[in-house]
Amino acid sequence: MKTMLIILLLALTPSLSSATDNFDEFRLNLHFVNGTKDTSNGDLEVNRIQSWIEEAEKQYATKPRLKLSYTIERKTTVAGRDLSSLTFNGMAEFNKFMDDHFDNQARTETEGHLTLLVGNTLCWNDLLGKQKCWGGWANFPHDVNPFNRKKGIWLSEGSDKYLLTHELGHFFSLKHTFEPYIGFNKQCNKDFANKNLFNPDLGHCNSCNGKIAVRDGRGGNQYYVCEGGVSNVMDYCSSLIPDEKGKFTVTGTETLNTCQQERAANQRQQFMTKAGKVDYVRLAGLRGEGQCEADTDCEDGEFCTAGILNLTRNVCKPKLDRGTLCTTKRQCASDRCSWGVCADPDECRADADCGSGNYCGDPISGKRTCKDKLSDGSVCTKDQQCQAGRCKTGFCSAPASASMGESCRFDDECREGKCNAPVGGLTKGTCVCNKDSDCGSGKWCDRGVDAKVNACRPKLDKGESCAGVAGNDHKCKSGECSGFPKYVCK
């Protein structure tokens, strides 16, 4: 049985744009989720989906004619619910479930799909507490509630070949035959008004040109069928013809009138870009949120909420601007989340906000930013600014970083010798030695006769030459240098 929620719709078809008048096809992607009890994807495709697709393309053949592509995914449970048999406390609970798990998706303007969950039963309690069960369900994307536009479509596996055509009709601005259109649009239902004031439900089958019969459905619900006649796709009245035993059990013929075909074609044009592709952002009403597992599943400028937000599903979200609350840098367009808000790439409050080799600067005014750590000899105000980790009297200084003859500011920078710079390091000097004690234990200071040589040299062993001048005892480990003529260490 084909059934559908009666909801208040603003069914005003937008004026047409000449930019989309010339396209022949409306190529729409569908994603079926097989939530049936025990039907395989292959069997569902052969026994149901193919006939649904064929009939929908046949009925919506007015230019731009409908062309459908589809994928199938198998799921049996979601959020602890058995997808084959869904029961809810009310329509709102069902809508939230669909919005959380099976919303229509618009990853980009021209990339997306409508989501169709296929199950066996769908029921909920009405306002009077009576259980109602449905054969199909879809929300028109231009619902008057602006936050009610993303929910996917539910289809019964046991329905006839017209069900998908019926549900897509709501996306193409078609109302049920027993519902009036609002405004000055094509009044496609004027021939189907209910003429039986004593039984308003007969309006659900007013399109039937055969015999209207009552059937008992699930949970004591009654429904109408059109026996031996033709009915309209957008009513609540399946058309049946006799089987070999003369019983009305075989699906008959259901059609759309010319007004409906034109109205649906006009709406399809409004769901197309100027390049002739389906505009999934318009079609879904609000932007659908593609599910993801990592940031790489999302578009540029988006992040995946996996591991960040407590959502029932992980979705792609636009990256956040500076000053927006965040918990990780992945959320931020700047790739920096500091102190719980997105910051500029170089913005900081502490050295820990900056990467290795950087420190957080202290400007006279304005925001603090990350800067490269300073090399030895650079002017500094604190140890954290220096690569060596030491700021000494206003200069970055690394202990034991200079060899003899290299520049220095402080004695402890010299590996050997002393720094001949003025005290305080205001100007640079050179690592030199003036006496043996400048060189440390086991070495002597070689100042050179002509002052061109200045080095700390290891003290000499017994028998080694200690030069040919007097006063060289300090060069020898023994402290004695023989005199003329050999001048060797004793």
Image (spheres, rainbow, N blue to C red):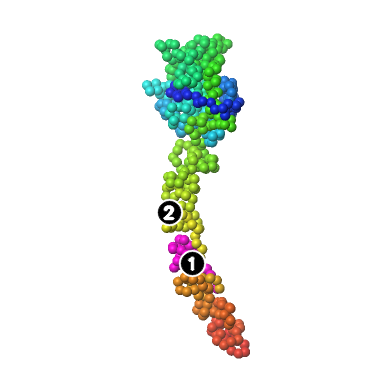
Residue 378 in picture, x, y percent from top left: 49, 64
Say which residue appears at 50% left-offset and 34% top-offset: 288
Task: Examine the rendered structure and indicate whether residue 216 appears above or below residue 35.
Answer: above
Say which residue appears at 43% left-offset and 57% top-offset: 363
Say which residue appears at 46% left-offset and 31% top-offset: 99
Q: Which residue is mark 1?
A: 397
Query: Which residue extends farthest bottom?
Result: 484
Say which residue appears at 45% left-offset and 21% top-offset: 182
CA distance for labels 2 and 1: 29 Å
Q: Nearer the viewer, mark 2 or mark 1?
A: 2
Query: Which residue extends farthest front?
Result: 18
Which residue type carries mark 2?
A: Gly
Examine the rendering and report whether any part of residue 162 can be seen. no
User: Is 394 colored magenta in this rendering?
Assistant: yes
Q: Hey, which quadrant is residue 96 in on the image?
A: top left
Magenta-colored span: 377-404
Q: Quadrant of the C terminus?
A: bottom right
Q: Which mark is residue 375?
A: none
Total labels drawn: 2
Which residue type carries mark 1?
A: Ser
Residue closest to the eye, 237 or 404: 404
Residue closest to the eye, 424 or 308: 424
Residue 356 in picture, x, y percent from top left: 50, 56
What is the chief secondary structure element of the magenta stretch? loop
Examine the rendering and report whether any part of residue 338 can be seen. yes
Q: Which residue is mark 2?
A: 366
- Using residue 47 as the reference point, say whether residue 205 is left or right of it: left
Residue 478 in picture, x, y percent from top left: 54, 83
Query: Which residue extends farthest left?
Result: 128
Under circle 1, the secondary element is loop
Under circle 2, the secondary element is loop
* Disc 2: CA contacts within 10 A as few (<14), some (14-19) or many (>=20): few
